[in-house]
Image (cartoon, rainbow, N blue to C red):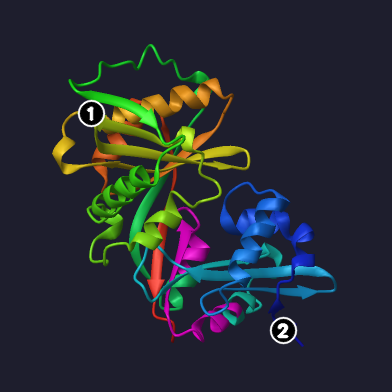
Amino acid sequence: MKPDPRRVTLQDLPALMPLYAALLSRPLTLERLELRFQRLEACPEVSAQWLVEEEGATLALCDWEANDYGTPDSLRLNVWVEPKAQGRGFGTALLKLAEQTGKLLSANIADDDSPSLAWAEKRGFVFHAHRFESKLDPQEFDPAQYAQPLPEGVTLGDMSGASAAEWDELTVLLIETFAQTPDAQSLPKWSVETARKAVQLSPQMRPEWLICAWRDGQLVGFTAALDMPGMVYNQMTSVADTAKGLSLAYLMKAELLRRLKAAGVSDVRTHNHAANLAMLRVNEKLGYVRQHGRWEVRRSGSS
C-alpha cells in the first residue's frame, strides 16, 4: 500500500531543508524556511504544504501559494519527488491535492529537465513562458571599467530613510512599469498592496540596495535587490517611459553591483523573460553570465 500525503509541520522543517532547497531551487536557512512556512500557513485558503514519507524518509514534497506574477486566480505550484521514488504516483497524488483548489496552477521547470517537462505535459500543463537565470560575482566587478557619466539632471541614490511619500512614488512607478513587462502581458495591473508587498514590505529587501534614479527631483527608475541566504537576488528593474533611452537601467544596476562588491557579496543573480531582450543585453554588458533556463508551465486546477 502506498503511503498517503500528509501536511508538513513546523517540526518537519529541519530535516526537510535540503529537500526544500531542491524544491525551490535556491539556498535556504532554517530561519527563512520557518518564516516561509508561517507565511503559507497564515493563508490556508490559497496555500498548503504536503509531503509523502515512507519508513521515516521523505519521498515527495509539494506546496502552493498565491502567484503575484500570474492571474488573480492562479497558484504557484512546487512539486519534488525523490528520484528513486519516481514512477510510484506520488507526484500525481500531490498534484490532485492542488487540483482541488480549482485554480490555475503554474510551475517552473528547468528547460534541461526533460523527464519533469514530459511529466507536466502529460498531465495537461502547457508551456507559457521561458526565462533565464544570470549570475555574477560582484567581487570580479570593476566599477571603474563600467563607469559611465550620468545624464544631465540625473542623480542616483537609495531608499534608506525614505519618507512615506517617497515610497508612494516608488509604488506608483512599479505598478506602471511592471504592467509593461513581458511577464505582465494580459494581466491586470498590480494593486498597491501587491506592489508594496513585493518591494517595501519584503523582509528580504535592504533599502541601501534599492537603487533609485531621479531626474530633476522626480523618481524615474529603480532596481531592487533581495538579501537571500548565500546570495543576493536582483529582483526587478524599472524605468519610467519619460526616461527611456538614458541608459538608466545600466547605470542603476552598475551602482548596485558597486555596493554589493563593497559589502563583500560574491553571488548575485537575476532572472529575465526570454522576450526581454533589452534587459538581457544590459545584464550581459555588465558581465552577467546566462545560466540555465526555466519553463513556466500552466494548467487549470481541474483535470
Residue at x-position 34% and y-position 46%: 165
Task: Give the left or right position of residue 182, taking residue 2 as reference.
Answer: left
Tell me the quarter of the image containing the N terminus: bottom right
Q: Which residue is mark 2?
A: 4
Q: Which residue is mark 1?
A: 247
Dot 1 amino acid type: Ser
Task: Give the left or right position of residue 241, taking residue 272 as reference.
Answer: left
Dot 2 amino acid type: Asp
- Residue in the foreground of this view, choosing between 129 and 100: 100
The question of residue 108 being in magenta is answered with yes
Residue 247, horizontal then vertical, whole percent: 23, 28
Q: Is residue 94 above or below residue 108?
A: below
- Residue in the foreground of this view, choosing between 298 and 101: 101
Q: Which residues are magenta?
A: 94-118
Residue furthest top as drawn: 144
Residue 268, horizontal then vertical, whole percent: 50, 34
Q: Is residue 21 above or below residue 61?
A: above
Residue at x-position 65% and y-position 58%: 35
- Residue in the foreground of this view, choosing between 185 and 221: 221
